[in-house]
Amino acid sequence: MLIAERISSTSRKVGIPDYSLEFPCAPTISRNLGSTVARHAGLDEGKPAAFHFDIVRKLAPLRDEGILIVGSGNLVHNLHAYAWGRHAADPYDWAVRFEDRAKELMLAGDTEPLIDYERLGREALLSIPTPDHYLPLLYVIASRQKGEAVSFPVEGVDGGSISMLSVEVGS
């Protein structure tokens, strides 16, 4: 079975609609990486965070077949507090505290508080006023398998309220 068919088949089995898309820069990637297949799954913000986490837990075994699971978002994403047009604004204390707490939880492998993020307090509520930029993090941490390391190759807060944190699972 082709990789694309395997991904689509597994996705359908766990309840993800088939939103297969041609990757827009496939010719460039194909030249650099050989045959590349990309599948895009849209986020249903109407579903609870636990739904998103559980879906990826079911897809995580695809990693053993060389399939990369990627989530693209922001741990802290509060545009209302963003320093638009101002020179390098210092990060808000609440943004730094929430990012630090989230990193601690990820390093410890403690995913429950990250799934139920609304109970993490004021810092979480300010950092995640809407879930659309946060939910991709759950896709990344749900793919983590027992014993795998987690690292943060890129860190920092832009404009005071947008986290640039990158989370890498495994090696």
Image (cartoon, rainbow, N blue to C red):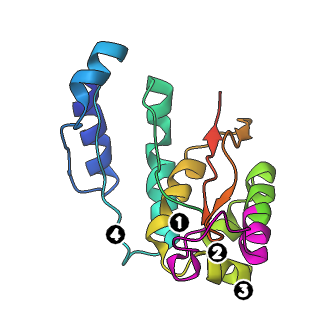
Any part of residue 91 in sight: yes
Label 2 or label 1, whichever lies nearer to me, is 1
Q: How far from the left and from the top, in percent, is residue 143? A: 55, 44
Q: Is residue 90 found inside the magenta-colored segment of the image?
A: yes
Question: Which label sits on residue 134?
Answer: 1
Residue linked to disc 2:
117
Q: Secondary structure at mark 1?
A: loop
- Do callouts 2 and 1 mark residues in contact (Cβ within 8 Å)? yes
Categorize mark 1 by other alpha carbons within 10 Å: few (<14), some (14-19), many (20+): many
- Crowdedness near tag 4: few (<14), some (14–19) or many (≥20) residues, C-alpha within 10 Å: few
* Earlier sequence position, callout 4 versus callout 2: 4
Task: Name the residue beneath numbered marker 4.
Answer: 44
Question: As shown in the figure, which amino acid type bears the numbered disc 4?
Answer: Asp
Q: Residue at x 55, y 58 (%)?
A: 138
Q: Residues within 10 Å of mark 3 (few under 14, many from 20)?
A: few
Instruction: Specify whether 87 is left or right of 67.
Output: right
Q: Which one is in front in this view, the residue at disc 2 or the one at disc 3? A: 3
Image quadrant holding the N terminus, namely top left
**Nearer-the-camera pick, 62 or 96:** 96
Q: Is residue 50 magenta?
A: no
Which amino acid type corresponds to the residue marked 3 in the rendered image? Arg
Q: Tell me the magenta residue range.
A: 76-99
Q: CA distance from mark 2 to mark 1?
A: 10 Å
**Could you tell me residue 18's position as x and y percent?**
20, 51
The answer to whether residue 1 is visible is no
Q: Is residue 134 left or right of residue 9?
A: right
Q: Position of residue 166 (x, y in %)?
A: 61, 47
- Amino acid marked by disc 2: Tyr
Query: In terms of image quadrants, where is residue 78?
Result: bottom right
Q: Sequence order check: which comes first, mark 2 or mark 1? A: 2
